[in-house]
Image (tube, rainbow, N blue to C red):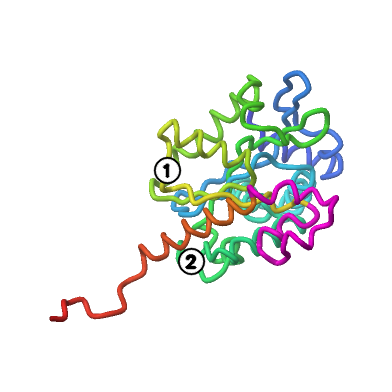
C-alpha cells in the first residue's frame, strides 16, 4: 500500500506547498473522477462527536499544503502533522470554520460532549471531536469538487471503494456511543447508509446541517437569522427552504432530547405524599 503521507511530505520538501498544489499526489482516476491525497488519517479514539462531510474541497487542499509546509519547516514529526491537519485543516478555513462554529453553538451541540462552546472542539476539547469525510481524498469531477449524491458515489467503483474502506472503516473504529452530525444531504445519506449496514445505531444520528462553506444565505436562513420572506426571488435558498426547515427541526429536537436524557433531576428524589 502506498505511504501517501510520506510521499506528500517529500514533495512539499522538494517543491514547497505551491509545487504540491500544482502537481498533487494522485490516488486514483475513474472516468471523469479524480482523487488526490490530503492528510486525513488522524483518529481520536475517545471522540464523542463526529462531524461528517462529503470530500475535501479546493480550499482544504491549499490549506493542507500550507500547514504541512509550515510544520515541516519546524521539523514536526509525521504523526503530529497528521494530527494538526485534522485539527487545523479539516473543516477549517475562513469559509467553513466560522459558519460551522455558529451552527454548532446555535444547537448547543458541544454541550452533549461536556464542552461549553464549539470553538473548544478545535482547542482544549479536540479529543472529543472526529471529523470524517465520505471520500477523505480530495475528489473532483471534471476539476470541480465532488458534489453528487450518494447514489452517484456508490455507482462509481473507485469512489465506492474509498467510501467503504476509509469512511465505513473509520466508523467501525469509533466508540459505540459517539454522536454524528452530517454536513449536507450527501453526507447525511452516507450516515443513513452506515446505519442500514448496522455500523451505527439510529439514535446516534443527531441530524444534518447545511455545508458550512455554502455562499449566500443558506447558513443565515438555517440559523433563523433571516426569514424566507427576506430572500430575493432569485435566491437559490428559496428552493431549499423545506429541507432546511426539516433538518433544523430534527437536529434541534434530537439535541434537546439528548440533553434532557443526561440532565440530572433538580427536584427531590423521593415521592411526596
* Of labels 1 and 2, the one closer to you: 1
**Alpha carbon separation for disc pair 1 and 2:** 20 Å
Q: Position of residue 155 (x, y in %)?
A: 63, 21
Q: Position of residue 95 (x, y in %)?
A: 77, 56
* Residue 229 on the magenta segment: yes
From what the image shows, is residue 246 above or below residue 41?
below
Which residue is labeled 1 in the image? 202
Q: Position of residue 153 (x, y in %)?
A: 64, 27
Instruction: Judge from the rendering whether residue 259 lies leftward or rightward of residue 22; answer left or right.
Output: left
Instruction: Judge from the rendering whether residue 150 lies leftward or rightward of residue 207; answer left or right.
Output: right
**In the foreground, 89 or 70:** 89
Which residue is labeled 2 in the image? 111
Q: Quadrant of the C terminus?
A: bottom left
Task: First in sequence, mark 1 or 2: give its number.
Answer: 2
Q: Residue at x 36, y 69 (%)?
A: 263
**In the foreground, 45 or 142:** 142
Magenta stretch?
215-243
Q: Residue at x 39, y 50 (%)?
A: 177
Q: Secondary structure at mark 1?
A: helix
From what the image shows, is residue 38 above or below residue 260?
above
Q: Residue at x 66, y 32 (%)?
A: 149
Q: Secondary structure at mark 2?
A: helix
* Residue 21 on the magenta segment: no
Q: Position of residue 249 (x, y in %)?
A: 55, 56
Circles 1 and 2, Cβ within 8 Å, touching? The answer is no
Rendered image quadrant of residue 93:
bottom right
The numbered dot on residue 168 is none
Amino acid at each position: 500500500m502506498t505511504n501517501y503521507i510520506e510521499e506528500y511530505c517529500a514533495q512539499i520538501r522538494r517543491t514547497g506547498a505551491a509545487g504540491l498544489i500544482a502537481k498533487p499526489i494522485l490516488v486514483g482516476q475513474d472516468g471523469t473522477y479524480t482523487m488526490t491525497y490530503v492528510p486525513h488519517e488522524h483518529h481520536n479514539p475517545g471522540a464523542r462527536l463526529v462531524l461528517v462531510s462529503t470530500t475535501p474541497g479546493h480550499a482544504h487542499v491549499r490549506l493542507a499544503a500550507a500547514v504541512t509546509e509550515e510544520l515541516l519547516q519546524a521539523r514536526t514529526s509525521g504523526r503530529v502533522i497528521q494530527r494538526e491537519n485534522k485539527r487545523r485543516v479539516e473543516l477549517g478555513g475562513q469559509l467553513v470554520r466560522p459558519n460551522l462554529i455558529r451552527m454548532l453553538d446555535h444547537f448547543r451541540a458541544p454541550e452533549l460532549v461536556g464542552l461549553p462552546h464549539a470553538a473548544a472542539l478545535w482547542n482544549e476539547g479536540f479529543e472529543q471531536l472526529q471529523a470524517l469525510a465520505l471520500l477523505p481524498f480530495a475528489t473532483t469531477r471534471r476539476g470541480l469538487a465532488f458534489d453528487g449524491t450518494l447514489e452517484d458515489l456508490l455507482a462509481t467503483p473507485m469512489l465506492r471503494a474509498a467510501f467503504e474502506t476509509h469512511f465505513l472503516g473509520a466508523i467501525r473504529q469509533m466508540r459505540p456511543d459517539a454522536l454524528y452530525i452530517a454536513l449536507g444531504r450527501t453526507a447525511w445519506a452516507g450516515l443513513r447508509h452506515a446505519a442500514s449496514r448496522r455500523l451505527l445505531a439510529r439514535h446516534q444520528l443527531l441530524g444534518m446541517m447545511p455545508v458550512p462553506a455554502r455562499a449566500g444565505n443558506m447558513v443565515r436562513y438555517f440559523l433563523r437569522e433571516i426569514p424566507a420572506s427576506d430572500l430575493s426571488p432569485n435566491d437559490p435558498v428559496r428552493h431549499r427552504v423545506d429541507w432546511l426547515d426539516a433538518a433544523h427541526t430534527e437536529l434541534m429536537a434530537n439535541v434537546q432530547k439528548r440533553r434532557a436524557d443526561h440532565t440530572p433531576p433538580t427536584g427531590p428524589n423521593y415521592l411526596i405524599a
